[in-house]
Image: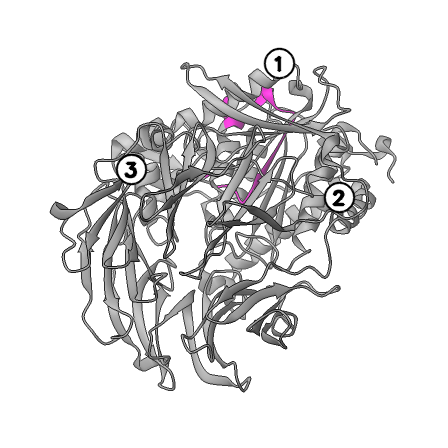
């Protein structure tokens, strides 16, 4: 494939100097300090990016990003053969003409399918049964033609099954235009609604929809509109506007189809209002007014609203209240709070209540019959796994769809029958190529003691033939923010690492919710440093236990996980041979000071507002960009997207420029900026694997793996 002697493993081998970014003086004065930022100029407004005639600053930025891409190409040139082979290997494991498990809803079976040779799927349905004639609701391959990026947002069928509303984004800024289609005739209506968040909810009259619009600058979803089919969208009525810039809004419909609900959410607070879906012109009623540190979600069943709430319940509980009176004074516990169990979610059926819980870092699915005669958990056997409720839109169904996967078990969809508790496998992800056998891989779960005595779960998988003698390469992944739990699921892509002797480890560090709500609170705001030290402590323990060594260990994280990468590079650069930081949030101070940037205002509860000196001082102790200093740094591959609305491209661009200014080593440091995509990377089913092949090849190059 490639002669490993041709690999480039130091900057001095490249033959051309690394890009040297311009420096322009820029001072930010805050708390009697003057912060110098010579790369502040890299920031561009959306108007500049989209202008037909770029100005001088835009030209300078694009020139710099292109030079970074050219340098990356030069460094990775010896791996092109490997990248191409890896890409073919990865996509070769995927079924090209795959089809989702059909879901029954209002007399139709809905599913999506791929045809070989296409990057995008067909959304389809059949009336009555799967033997009926197929109706193609959305032709993804046709709609995507002519677009370098294409994404369909939420799509929703009207209650009478005849109309479809769906959103389309062709820029990768998560700004969707809504379109309407007659499913009986195939006609596309003239109604078009731009700058939405991509989804819409039908009232029961089959002509009225509710949708949210984004602020054009911050992209915060802040208004809910009502649109009547056949009327101009510029006449749509604003039914609710969220004026608090730390909140965003969403609109949805109860599973019972009886209520439409608007939810205002910040990181730590919720407010929900509702109307009857049969009365789209009625006034909205607030279920419970917003209050600090109170999050809740609302479902409807029978004569009651069921509320998933953390009011006086750190790990959440389930209460109910009559529709007529939602005062907190009459809330009645259905599932009380438990100190050792996190109640993550609920699903309602006419006969059963299904709970998604988490205990000791593992998922559990609990099933309770409404009459109280049954209360049990589904059983799972792997040491580390991921179990979750799937698509269950049919309120009267007597079966539960749920998904299951582990580090060695491909994603599997099951049907659980309430009547006899039997389990039927509906589909398991196929791994093509004839080489995959679960018995060839070993999965482990460790509890690693952090420096303050807390036990951190780590999920591990490797090929059975890999020798754990301290010399095996290991990729350590984590996220650790927003209370998002990272569960150990199967990846056919990951086999390309495992089959070449890599160990893969996922650290369930504080900042997520793997071990309950307190796990999240112990990794945010003034406790954020725990996230970074947990990761370092897990890495050091894996070295001590003989899984790898610092010469062969790699770290990977994206977005807020990219913040983690930047922090550990500053705190413990000697622990890792290489770091892969995807769309990394690394310029914390500058971003959180700018409330015009998407996400900033409703992230104060996560990081703190640096305009408050106490928060500023703490953020300054870990902000990756602000803590770069003269030292040796690991080999690094940084990725970003020019159109990223979540972590703007200039954060990683500024970061790599500053790292090059200060690093004292000869290690490789490269950045790839995809000039056509945003936060989620390339659209399409297979295109994203080209970037994965690049990331894997980067590590293989450093390890001398040439096939």
- Determine which quarter of the picture holds residue 541: top right
Q: Nearer the viewer, mark 3 or mark 1?
A: 1
Helix, strand or loop for disc 3:
strand
Q: Position of residue 555 (x, y in %)?
A: 59, 30
Q: Nearer the viewer, mark 1 or mark 2?
A: 1
Q: Which of marks 3 and 2 is in front?
A: 2
Q: Nearer the viewer, residue 627 or 308?
A: 308
- Within 10 Å of disc 1 (Cα), the crowding (few <14, some 14-19, many 20+) is few
Q: Residue at x 54, y 55 (%)?
A: 678
Q: Where is residue 333 in the image (x, y as percent from the top left)?
A: 22, 41
Q: Can residue 27 be seen at all in this image of the molecule?
A: yes
**Residue located beneath label 2 in the image:** 74
Relative horizontal placement of residue 414, taking residue 428 as reference (left or right): left
**Residue located beneath label 3 in the image:** 30
User: Height in image: 185 above or below 529?
Assistant: below
Inter-mark Cα distance, 3 to 1:
46 Å
**Residue bounds of the magenta highlight:** 568-586
**Residue located beneath label 1 in the image:** 545
Q: Where is residue 410 in the image (x, y as percent from the top left)?
A: 65, 43
Q: Label 2 near label 1: C-beta < 8 Å? A: no
Q: Which residue is drawn at 20% across and 42% down?
A: 292
């Amino acid at each position: 494939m490639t002669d490993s002697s041709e690999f480039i493993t130091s900057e001095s081998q490249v033959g051309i100097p690394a890009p040297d970014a311009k420096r322009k003086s820029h001072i930010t004065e805050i708390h009697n300090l003057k912060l110098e930022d010579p790369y502040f100029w890299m920031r561009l407004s959306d108007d500049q990016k989209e202008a037909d005639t770029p100005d001088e600053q835009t030209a300078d930025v694009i020139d710099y990003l292109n030079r970074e891409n050219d340098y990356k190409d030069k460094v990775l040139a010896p791996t092109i053969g490997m990248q191409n082979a890896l890409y073919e290997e990865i996509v070769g494991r995927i079924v090209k003409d795959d089809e989702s498990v059909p879901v029954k809803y209002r007399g139709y079976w809905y599913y999506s399918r791929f045809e070989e040779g296409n990057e995008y799927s067909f959304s389809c349905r059949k009336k009555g049964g799967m033997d009926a004639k197929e109706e193609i609701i959305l032709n993804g391959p046709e709609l995507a033609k002519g677009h370098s990026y294409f994404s369909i947002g939420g799509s929703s069928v009207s209650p009478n099954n005849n109309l479809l509303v769906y959103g389309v984004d062709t820029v990768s800024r998560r700004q969707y235009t809504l379109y309407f289609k007659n499913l009986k005739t195939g006609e596309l209506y003239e109604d078009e609604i731009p700058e939405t968040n991509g989804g819409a909810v039908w009232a029961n009259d089959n002509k009225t929809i509710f949708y949210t619009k984004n602020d054009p600058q911050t992209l915060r979803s802040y208004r809910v509109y009502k649109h009547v089919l056949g009327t101009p969208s510029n006449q749509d009525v604003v039914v609710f506007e969220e004026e608090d810039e730390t909140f965003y809004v969403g609109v949805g419909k109860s599973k019972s189809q009886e209520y439409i609900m608007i939810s205002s959410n910040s990181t730590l607070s919720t407010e929900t209002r509702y109307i009857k879906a049969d009365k789209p012109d009625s006034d909205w009623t607030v279920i419970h007014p917003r209050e600090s540190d109170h999050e809740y979600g609302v479902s409807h069943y029978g004569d009651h609203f069921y509320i998933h709430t953390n009011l006086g319940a750190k790990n959440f509980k389930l209460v109910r209240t009559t529709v007529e009176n939602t005062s907190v004074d009459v809330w009645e516990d259905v599932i009380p709070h438990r100190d050792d169990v996190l109640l993550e979610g609920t699903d309602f059926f006419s006969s059963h209540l299904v709970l998604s819980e988490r205990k000791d870092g593992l998922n559990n699915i609990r099933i309770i019959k409404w009459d109280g005669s049954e209360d049990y958990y589904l059983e799972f056997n792997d040491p580390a796994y991921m179990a979750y409720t799937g698509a269950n839109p049919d309120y009267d169904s007597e079966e539960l769809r749920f998904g299951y996967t582990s580090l060695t078990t491909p994603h599997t969809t099951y049907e659980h029958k309430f009547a006899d508790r039997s389990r039927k496998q509906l589909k398991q992800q196929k791994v093509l190529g004839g080489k995959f056998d679960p018995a060839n891989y070993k999965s482990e779960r460790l509890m690693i003691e952090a420096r303050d005595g807390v036990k951190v779960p780590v999920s591990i998988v490797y090929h059975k033939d890999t020798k754990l003698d301290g010399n095996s390469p290991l990729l350590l992944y984590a996220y650790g923010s927003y209370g998002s739990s990272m569960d150990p699921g199967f990846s056919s892509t990951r086999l390309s690492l495992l089959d070449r002797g890599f160990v893969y480890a996922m650290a369930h560090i504080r900042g997520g919710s793997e071990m309950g709500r307190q796990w999240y609170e112990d990794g945010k705001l003034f406790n954020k440093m725990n996230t970074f030290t947990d990761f370092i402590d897990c890495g050091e323990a894996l070295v001590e236990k003989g899984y790898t060594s610092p010469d062969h260990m790699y770290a990977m994280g994206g977005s807020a996980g990219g913040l983690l990468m930047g922090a550990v590079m500053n705190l413990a650069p000697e622990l890792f041979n290489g770091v892969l930081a995807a769309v990394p949030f690394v310029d914390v101070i500058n971003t959180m000071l700018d409330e015009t940037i998407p996400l900033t205002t409703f992230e104060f509860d996560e990081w703190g507002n640096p305009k408050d000196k106490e928060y500023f001082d703490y953020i300054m102790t870990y902000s990756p960009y602000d803590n770069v200093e003269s030292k040796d740094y690991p080999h690094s591959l940084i990725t970003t997207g020019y159109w990223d609305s979540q972590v703007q491209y200039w954060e990683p661009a500024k970061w790599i420029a500053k790292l090059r200014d200060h690093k004292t080593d000869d290690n490789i440091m490269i950045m790839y900026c995809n000039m056509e995509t945003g936060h989620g990377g390339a659209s399409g089913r297979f295109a994203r694997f080209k970037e994965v092949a690049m990331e894997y090849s980067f590590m293989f190059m450093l390890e001398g793996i040439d096939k």
